[in-house]
Image (tube, helix red, strand yellow):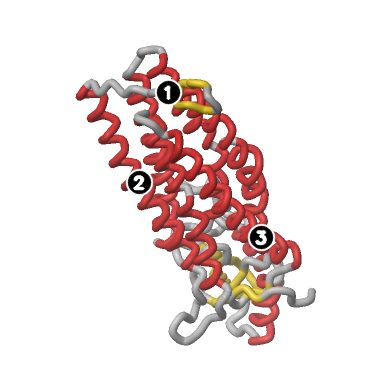
Amino acid sequence: MSVVHQFGRTDLPRTQHRALRSAARWEVFTICYTAVTITVVAFVVGNSQAMRTAWIEDMLSLLPQFAFLIALIFVRRSPTKRHPYGMHRAMGVGHLVAGVALLAVGANLAVEAVSGLIAGDHPTIGTVQIFGHTIWLGWLMVSVMAVIVIGPVFIYGPAKSKIAPVLHNKLLYADADMAKADWQTNAASIVGVLGIGLGVWWLDGVAALFISLGIIWDGFRNTKGAVLDLMDQRAKTYDDKAPHPLAQEVLELTRSRPWVQDAGVRMRDQGQVFHIEAFVIPRRAKVAVSELNELSRAITALDWKVQDIVVAPVSRLPEEVDTGEADG
């Protein structure tokens, strides 16, 4: 396989190289699209608390894209003595920063929504003159929120969700997941605006609270996932739903060697790539260096995400290693 792109210590296969370039383009497109929607919503936000909360959420949604693009600058760099494992953790740090920001701002917006409901604030929506006609501003709000949801739900959200598994990028997956769920925010803001128009003032506050809770949930989920990865939890799939199957593949490959009696693996997610430690119990007292090197090369060839591999002969497997057995 020819080298087409350098990614830390790993040479990306052509498929991942194209996916990475596509992901970067989609993130730039998302930033531009969101900047336009933020500007448009700013003209019609009015006194609706739900609209204002949705507007702030649009601003917050820019965080994952900027975090991805900035982290991409660092993860490309090769390992050095100062950073012997490379800088792939930058993707996890960006994930964490975005999650904490969502969590903090979402909590603040939720407090504002509850305070408004308790205080019994009665928001009003006026009228505007367009081409000589008087129109209720609420109709413009509803129209804008119904149109701008097309991008995240039907265009770049699904596109990024297809790329994330190819790159094993959890930040990109979280970004796509948040985008595809944008219809809930837009639907809630529309309900809030129509509630004001019908005289049901508290619907606006409830809609704002619903949107705020969605932001808090996104923040909590992203923060939790990023923290666990940075604390070297067992490597999982891009969506954090299951242990990554590569660990089982490494075990099967290692145990297939005639000189190996048993094996265990310890795999950490560096952020798109893995650092793997394979512990092997040899069948004999002495193991040739050539055998260890061959096994190391074979494991590296299993998956492009194998950034570093250490094969360690031991007389007894450490208790914490993955041996392929079901969790107790």
Q: In the image, which disc is placed on residue 127?
A: 1
The residue where tag 2 is placed is 103
On screen, residue 135 above or below 225: above
169 vs 327: above or below: below
* Residue 46 sits in quarter: top left
Near mark 3 (Cα within 10 A), the count class, few <14, some 14-19 or many ≥20, is: some
Q: Which residue is mark 3?
A: 249
Question: Which is nearer the eye, 34 or 167?
Answer: 34
Q: Nearer the viewer, residue 94 or 33?
A: 33
Where is residue 142? Give x, y as percent.
51, 26
Viewer-side label of 2, 1: 1
Could you tell which of marks 2 and 1 lies nearer the N-terminus? 2
Label 1 vs label 3: CA separation? 64 Å
Local crowd size for mark 2, using a 10 Å CA cut-off: few (<14), some (14–19), many (≥20): many
Corner quadrant of residue 289: bottom right
Residue at the spot 33% in from the left edge and 45% down from the top edge: 105
Asked whether residue 279 appears in the rendered view, the answer is no
Q: Is residue 165 visible?
A: yes
Q: Mark 2: which amino acid?
A: Leu
Callout count: 3
How many other residues sit within 10 Å of disc 1, few (<14), some (14-19) or many (≥20)? few
Identity, as a three-letter code, of the amino acid under mark 1: Thr
Residue 211: image location, x then y, percent: 41, 33
Residue at the spot 23% in from the left edge and 21% down from the top edge: 120
Label 2 – label 1 distance at C-alpha = 35 Å
Please state which amino acid type lies under the numbered disc 3.
Glu
Disc 3 to disc 2, C-alpha distance:
37 Å
- Look at discs 3 and 2 and give the one toward the viewer: 2
- Extreme residue toward the left, this view: 119
